[in-house]
Amino acid sequence: MPKHTNLTALIPSRHPLLQAPMAGAQGAALALAVCAAGGVGSLPAAMLSPESLKAELQVMREQARGPWNVNFFCHTPPEPDGAAEARWREALRPFFNEAGIDSAAVPAGAGRVPFSHAVADVVEPFAPPVVSFHFGLPAADLLARVKSWGSRVVSSATTVEEAVWLQAHGADAVIAQGLEAGGHRGMFLSTELGTQLGTFALLPQVVRAVQVPVIAAGGIADATGVRAAMALGAAGVQVGTAYLCCPEATTSRLHREALMSEAARHTELTTLFSGRPARGIVNRLMRTLGPLNPAAPAFPLATAAVAPLRAHFEQLGRSDCSPLWAGQNASGCRAVPAAEITAALAGGFD
Ligand SMILES: Cc1cc2nc3c(=O)[nH]c(=O)nc-3n(C[C@H](O)[C@H](O)[C@H](O)COP(=O)(O)O)c2cc1C
């Protein structure tokens, strides 16, 4: 297989720049703004109901200028485990007591559903130009269905092994997601955090190991970061955190304030909000329980018990129990239109 390093030949946008899909922090508005500015805007679908997904896809199809991306998770849902759920609620008991919430009355639930044929039924009429996945790829028949629409398929690798696996299983391009990245680690071949590499170490090794274009992600906040990634062999970049304070994002006020404060300098990987490691700004829940507390149940089951606590403290204007997803480099966050962030980043391709 010859080496392909031209991302815009595969995904014909003006800049080889993907705005990272960020579930819970944005919808079509941010994606459209990035598309209009010459990047590839992304619609995160992991937390959308079929009805909302359809509505957002309609907006993208009608209004997007240039190629756009829709993003799904493809984890295997865990078996419900009553004992694990009870241990989790016990670990959270001091918070439930403080909030005056009866933990027994809080419904268990998943919150995030993986890509499936039922979801594909919703997506198919829209034939999105790009479909990206987190946590691997869907099963071969489902992936073949996505490719039959003409969609380009992209997924995140956090190790060289994952990048090689993604290429072998049909990814048209691979995102090298360095340890600096905000939000969930896309890891899927190992659960061992010691396998995870920073962008500077991961990117050139992935570039050497695969023939498909490699998109660098994690800690890229400005044109200099883009230039560094391109110098290390990236065919393009994916940027998330830097877009979080744009007016087109739906990032909460508390989250924006944390991103713009010195608190953003201290992020950690935590399993407390979903069950899988994800990077966010350290808050009271993470400090109290420890960010990787083993009582957190399997992904995505940790979310349900934390949800009412999050809502309680947010009502008081506090982010004690809120996931404040952010990468290690929030220095690119500015409260300016996404077009401005996109233009600044694109300067790194000159
Ligand atoms: C708030 C937030 C939410 C995220 N949600 C998703 C998601 O839904 N799907 C996904 O593939 N990646 C998600 N990510 C990870 C990004 O795809 C990407 O790896 C990361 O933003 C790149 O690092 P950076 O944040 O330092 O730019 C999220 C990141 C953040 C900051």
Image (cartoon, grey):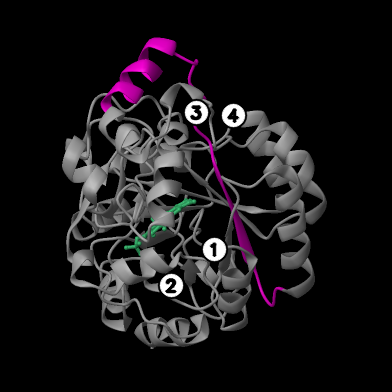
First-in-chain label (3 vs 2): 3
Dividing the picture into quadrants, the one containing residue 300 is top left
Amino acid identity at mark 2: Tyr
Disc 3 versus disc 2: nearer the observer = 3
**Residue found at x 47% / y 62%:** 20
Amino acid identity at mark 3: Val
Which region is colored magenta? 64-91
First-in-chain label (4 vs 1): 1
Q: Quadrant of ligand 1?
A: bottom left
Tag of residue 26: 1
Amino acid identity at mark 4: Ala
First-in-chain label (1 vs 3): 1
Tag of residue 243: 2
CA–CA distance between discs 1 and 2?
A: 9 Å
CA–CA distance between discs 4 and 2?
A: 32 Å
Disc 4 versus disc 2: nearer the observer = 2
Tag of residue 266: none
CA–CA distance between discs 4 and 1?
A: 27 Å
User: Does residue 70 belong to the magenta stretch?
Assistant: yes
- Could you tell me which secondary element the residue under label 3 belongs to? loop
Dividing the picture into quadrants, the one containing residue 234 is bottom left
What is the x, y in percent for residue 223?
32, 82
Q: 117 left or right of 330?
A: right
Disc 4 versus disc 1: nearer the observer = 1
Identify the residue position indicated by label 4 in the image: 139
Label 3 near label 1: C-beta < 8 Å?
A: no
